[in-house]
Image (cartoon, helix red, strand yellow):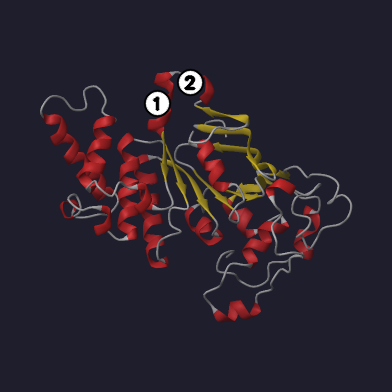
Amino acid sequence: MADALLRLENVGRVFPTDAGPAPAVDGVDLALAAGSVTCLVGESGSGKTTTARIAAGLTTASSGRVLFDGRPLAELGRSGLVAFRRAVQYIHQDPYASLNPTRTVQSTLVSALLRQRRRGLWCGRSEHRAARSRAAELLSMVDLTPPENYLAKYPHQLSGGQRQRVAIARALTTGPRLIIADESTSMLDVSIRISLLNVLTGLRERLDVGYLFITHDLALAKYFGRDGRTAVMYLGRIVENGPTSRVIGDPQHPYTRALLAAVPEPDPDLTRGKRAIELRSADVPSLTAIPDGCPFHPRCPMARPEPCQLERPVLTGAAGHRAACHRTADVRAELPLLGDSAVTR
């Protein structure tokens, strides 16, 4: 992606533990552009959040580098870091924990706006008045209307969906070009998730803001990133990456197919006719003892002694759709996606 706003190049992060070093992220490459959507999916513990925190500059990479507008974060001066912080915003998973419980919605937004004020935006006595007006506009943009009903409320007086909308409005105070949403809908009721995703989509169309959307739910990735890209992570590595329609419609890695097979279907007829993919093991290997060769081979139903257990596969493929699997040519025949799935259709 030539016009990438943020680029991760061979990024790794190793955490020291009592059992030895744990590579939570290993050799991740991602390109994120304004106005685009990239979904990062995988099981819990796959490294999604650590990757997101590295991209946001909240966690330092042990190896590789993160580039903002073509410049490494480590080489940005004070003004460059300020521009980065304004351009890249982070929405946490738990909105109740990420919002200050002692501040009203108005105080949360106005204080953020005043900290991010630019020369000529507000001046003199009108500064706070302009900030309060802008805070009301931001609430309207995230469908908290009329905003006057929310400005004086505290986080505990809001529902989970309303708190997350306030968190989104706070992220918008800096005029971001990229928002990193870390499981931002996982703590919400299913009925609320789609409406929140629609808000994010509307902001993308209105403000040309891009997203790195972290989720473990392939159905949400299909809905939100339908015209974007999806990367699948396993044990800290990206094992498949490509256009969302191809990754979910025709996955090339056995792990991606196993994730799709595990998605529950709303239609009982589809559920009864759906073929389950039997993994060789339900246990995910420890990060301190990652298997040699393909890290998925202890669980993969397609694994062979050679080369799966001996050689680490690299991402290969055509037309921007790549998978790290030695047996990509056989995956359709051995692990077919049967039935008209609500996710893959």
- Dot 1, crowdedness within 10 Å: few (<14), some or many (≥20)? some
**Left or right: 275 with respect to 4?**
right
The image shows residue 284 at horizontal and vertical percentages of 69, 57
Q: Residue at x 34, y 44 (%)?
A: 206
Q: In percent of the image, x 32 and y 47: which residue is there?
A: 99
Q: Quadrant of the C terminus?
A: bottom right
**Is 79 on the left-hand or right-hand side of 255?**
left
Which residue position is annotated with label 2? 76
- 220 relative to 132, above or below: below
Q: Nearest the camera: 319 or 150? A: 150
Find disc 1 in the rendering and name its residue: 83
Describe the element under mark 2 as helix, strand or loop: loop
Local SS, label 1 = helix
Q: Confirm or deny contact between disc 1 and disc 2 (CB under 8 A).
A: yes
> Which residue type carries mark 2?
Leu
Work out how far the residue at label 1 is from the one at label 2, CA to CA, in angstroms: 10 Å
Q: Nearer the viewer, residue 116 or 157?
A: 157
Task: Identify the residue at image location x=13%, y=36%.
Answer: 129
Residue 221 in the image, given as x and y percentages of width and height: 52, 55
The residue sitting at the front extreme is 18
Amino acid at the residue labelled 1? Ala
In the rendered image, which quarter is residue 146 located in? bottom left
Tag shown at residue 125: none
Report x, y in % for residue 159: 30, 61
Q: Is residue 225 left or right of residue 199?
A: right
N-terminal of the pair, mark 1 or mark 2, is 2
Horizontal and vertical percent position of residue 244: 57, 52
